[in-house]
Image (cartoon, rainbow, N blue to C red):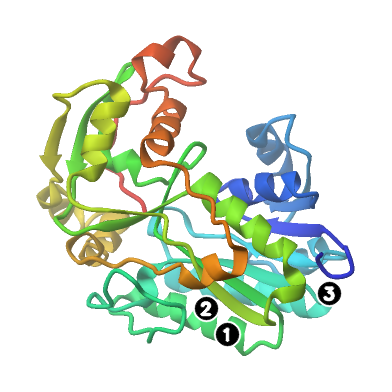
């Protein structure tokens, strides 16, 4: 078990995709969850009354509030991210430093959700944990620096790398800009590139994290694992969406990169998206051989089941429309990854 059975964790970014799912999975595994929020009342309302989280007022950019919130915890899940790609340079590393300082003070392990930004476009489809990190983008270089600071800080750490997030309650999911939607149905799917692309179904990824933390006694002080998820070849997502929505003629179209390119001078999110376009044109996937050897059984929801849960959460299944929490929103050209 974890740190002499101290199963209290601080989640930073608990209203985001990874943080919210990580908190839910850890609660199921017996963890007491504390979460940092600039507005605890709003965060608690968003999470819902059935989510037993202790919300603490604070900001990931404020080292003192992170340190105060971390008192008595054995794990800090660092799931903080600037929304919509904005100001990575000015926020990502200071937030990481706040978490590292808090972890040092209380003796906690830091959990960091990683991604494939660290690797070169020619890294291939089966990248192992020890593969060379040769980022070609600004965000990739920042991710490498985050991991370097964490690894050399003297605190215990666990990095769980994966592909693009998707699933229910994943507000920044790529599905938001890979689909067009109207009223109670999906009306089309975009194909942004010809290469296979890595996706991580959030409930599976979060459950994987919870299982890793249950095996604290076998983790190295500085450890990392790769979660392969779904490496979808060109056309696989569209085919799944057709099956799930029961629309065999659902439109599949090339993503309008020209629109993103034209708007990029005025929209920071679009400029950042263009920088990461290579991820859709080159196959970059993760090998989870080490994860399988460590856990034995890695959560793996079938693709159609995962896509269905995601589309249902958007309120975009015709048969589910009367019961959807929110109406199926029309898609907007505001991609985030």
Which corner quadrant holds the C terminus?
A: bottom left
In the image, taking residue 26 as reference, residue 84 lies left or right, namely left
What label sits on residue 211 in the rendered view? none
Q: CA distance from mark 3 to mark 2?
A: 20 Å
Identify the element where label 2 is drawn.
helix
Quarter occupied by residue 101? bottom right
Please say if the residues under marks 2 and 1 sit with CB atoms less than 8 Å apart.
yes
> What residue sits right under mark 1 in the picture?
149
Res 204 visible? yes
Q: CA distance from mark 2 to mark 1?
A: 5 Å
> What residue sits right under mark 2 in the picture?
146
Quarter occupied by residue 317? top left
Q: Nearer the viewer, residue 49 or 252?
A: 252
Residue 125 placed where, x, y %? 29, 69
Give me the residue at 81% from left, 66% from top. Answer: 2
Residue 47 placed where, x, y %? 66, 36
Residue 109 placed where, x, y %? 72, 73
Looking at the image, is mark 3 or mark 1 earlier in the sequence? 3
Q: Give the vertical position of 8 relative to 187 (above or below).
A: below
In the image, taking residue 113 as reference, residue 56 lies left or right, namely right
Please say if the residues under marks 3 and 1 sit with CB atoms less than 8 Å apart.
no
> What residue sits right under mark 3 in the picture?
106
């Amino acid at each position: 078990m974890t740190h002499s059975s101290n199963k209290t964790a601080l989640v930073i970014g608990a209203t985001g995709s990874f943080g919210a799912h990580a908190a839910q999975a850890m609660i199921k595994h017996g963890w007491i969850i504390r979460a940092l929020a600039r507005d605890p009342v709003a965060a608690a309302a968003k999470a819902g009354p059935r989510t037993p989280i202790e919300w603490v007022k604070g900001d990931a950019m404020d080292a003192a509030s992170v340190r105060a919130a971390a008192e008595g915890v054995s794990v800090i899940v660092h799931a903080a991210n600037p929304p919509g790609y904005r100001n990575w340079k000015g926020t990502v590393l200071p937030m990481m430093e706040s978490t590292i300082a808090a972890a040092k003070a209380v003796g906690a392990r830091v959990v960091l959700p990683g991604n494939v930004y660290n690797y070169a476009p020619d890294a291939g489809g089966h990248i192992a944990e020890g593969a060379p990190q040769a980022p070609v983008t600004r965000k990739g270089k920042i991710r490498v620096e985050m991991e370097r600071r964490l690894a050399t800080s003297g605190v215990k750490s666990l990095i769980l790398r994966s592909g693009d997030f998707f699933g229910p309650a994943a507000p920044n999911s790529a599905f938001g800009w890979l689909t067009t939607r109207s009223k109670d149905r999906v009306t089309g799917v975009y194909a942004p590139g010809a290469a296979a692309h890595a996706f991580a179904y959030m409930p599976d990824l979060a459950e994987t994290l919870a299982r890793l933390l249950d095996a604290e006694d076998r983790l190295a002080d500085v450890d990392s694992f790769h979660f392969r998820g779904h490496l979808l070849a060109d056309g696989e997502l569209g085919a799944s969406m057709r099956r799930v929505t029961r629309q065999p003629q659902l439109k599949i179209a090339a993503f309008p990169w020209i629109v993103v390119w034209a708007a990029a001078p005025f929209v920071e999110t679009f400029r950042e998206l263009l920088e990461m376009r290579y991820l859709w044109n080159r196959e970059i996937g993760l090998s989870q051989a080490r994860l399988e050897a460590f856990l034995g059984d890695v959560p793996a929801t079938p693709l159609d089941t995962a896509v269905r849960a995601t589309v249902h959460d958007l309120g975009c299944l015709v048969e589910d429309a009367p019961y959807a929490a929110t109406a199926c929103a029309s898609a907007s050209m505001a991609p985030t990854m």
